[in-house]
Amino acid sequence: MTNIKPAERLASVSEYYFSRKGKEIAALEADGHDIISLAIGSPDMPPSEATIKTLAQEASRPNAHGYQPTRGIKELRTQMAAFYERTYGVSLDAETEVQPLIGSKEGILHITLALVNPGDEVLVPDPGYPTYSSLSTLLGAKVVKYNLTATNHWQPDFEELEHLVTPRTRILWSNYPHMPTGAKAQRETYERLVQFAKRHSLVVVNDNPYSFILNHDRLSILQIEGAKDCCIELNSMSKSHNMPGWRVGMLMTNATLISWILKVKSNIDSGTLRPLQLAAAKALQNDAQWHERANITTYAKRRAIAEQIMDTLGCTYDKESVGMFLWGRIPQKYDNAETLTERVLHEADVFITPGFIFGNNGKRYIRISLCAKDERMQQALERIKKMTI
């Protein structure tokens, strides 16, 4: 293959951190290390019993395995609209304003392809989900970072945004409750984002997969008057319904933006298996008690252990943060977060995420995932206590 070269765009991005680190973890485990991963946000609990039962029943039908419409089946779109009405008080037309996705990461790609030309600009939070930046870069867009800081409670600085926006800015990416910091959604932030979008003729995309995790105050940017005209909201069943491997996301906005995104999506995929869509529709009907057990009670116990780990490592954190991660600032004695996380990995066999992967403003932070059984988290705590910190 000496004469074969990759596309030039590959030079602009690197392999995803967790993909690269996963190889190192696999090598350590092959050498006999029992690695406890508190790194990735992949829920370790199953979906509701009714969800699994529906999948099994529908998959047993001999005519259930054909191609499906890119728009998604009516049953799923109807339940997604009902979920938004029930959860956020947002009214959506299931025919024209709801688009099921094969995971919200797919939605990030399709939105960017539909709205951003090569050379256009996108505003991306720092710290923030790395995919906002990497996909934009791969598609030839210019990524412009806007700062989120602890002093501003990890909310946007709108004065800074006014200096960063240009006539070529097409999208502002937003994510509340925020990953990785756990900052809560604020209605005032949403109101100002809608005003900003209208003033600068751009689209705000709010990524909202964490509003059920350790959080009862569930907000949507689409609750703001006029938001549907200039905003898109992504949501996901991965976190809230314990379905990360199912790859079911949803996109809500006005009919025009949906039609543009559908033009992209219809040229890329061929729809989702019908039994899986019907099972997802059933999951969206989970009652409040199921979410209280799965998303509040379970994670609250794990959060308490994660706080003890942070305390043991000498890190400071926000006790009011939400979501399935705990974000902590490292002690001053460490040069950077990776110095600490590498020590924890190689001395305690515990994998914790260094905050630098989420942006420059994460360099002095670490993130602990709550997606591990209580016993494993307790075991991780005991191992870390034995380290010389």
Image: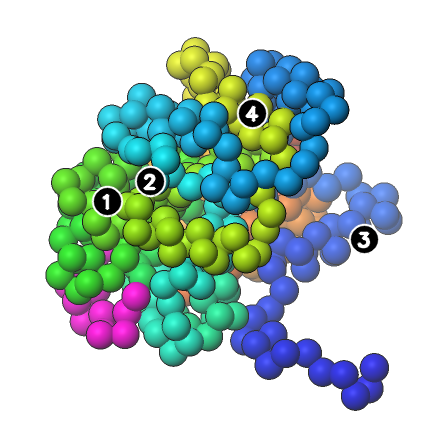
Q: Which numbered disc flags the more N-terminal residue, 2 or 1?
A: 2
Any part of residue 233 in sight: yes
- Between the C-alphas of marks 4 and 3, the distance is 39 Å
Question: Looking at the picture, which amino acid does disc 1 mark?
Answer: Lys
> Which residue does the image show at 34% across and 40% down from the upper left?
96
- Find numbered disc 4 in the image and state the secondary structure of the residue it sits on: helix
What is the basis of the colouring in this image?
Answer: rainbow
Any part of residue 249 in sight: no
- Between the C-alphas of marks 1 and 3, the distance is 48 Å
- Between the C-alphas of marks 4 and 1, the distance is 27 Å
The answer to which quarter of the image holds residue 54 is top right
- Between the C-alphas of marks 2 and 1, the distance is 9 Å
Residue 97: give its label.
2
Q: Residue furthest right?
A: 31
The residue carrying mark 1 is 228
Q: Are marks 1 and 3 in contact (CB under 8 Å)?
A: no
> Which residue does the image show at 36% across and 49% down from the upper left?
258
Which percent across, then down, holds residue 216? 32, 24
- Between tags 2 and 3, which lies in front? 2
Residue 27: give its label.
3
User: Looking at the picture, does residue 245 appear above or below residue 139?
Assistant: above
Q: Which numbered disc flags the more N-terminal residue, 2 or 4?
A: 2
Judging depth in this view, the residue of 252 and 135 nearest the camera is 252
Q: Are marks 2 and 1 in contact (CB under 8 Å)?
A: yes
- Between tags 2 and 1, which lies in front? 2
**In the image, 241: left or right of 332?**
right
- Between the C-alphas of marks 2 and 4, the distance is 19 Å
Q: Which residues are magenta?
A: 153-170
Quarter containing the N terminus: bottom right
Residue 278: give its label.
4
- Find numbered disc 1 in the image and state the secondary structure of the residue it sits on: helix
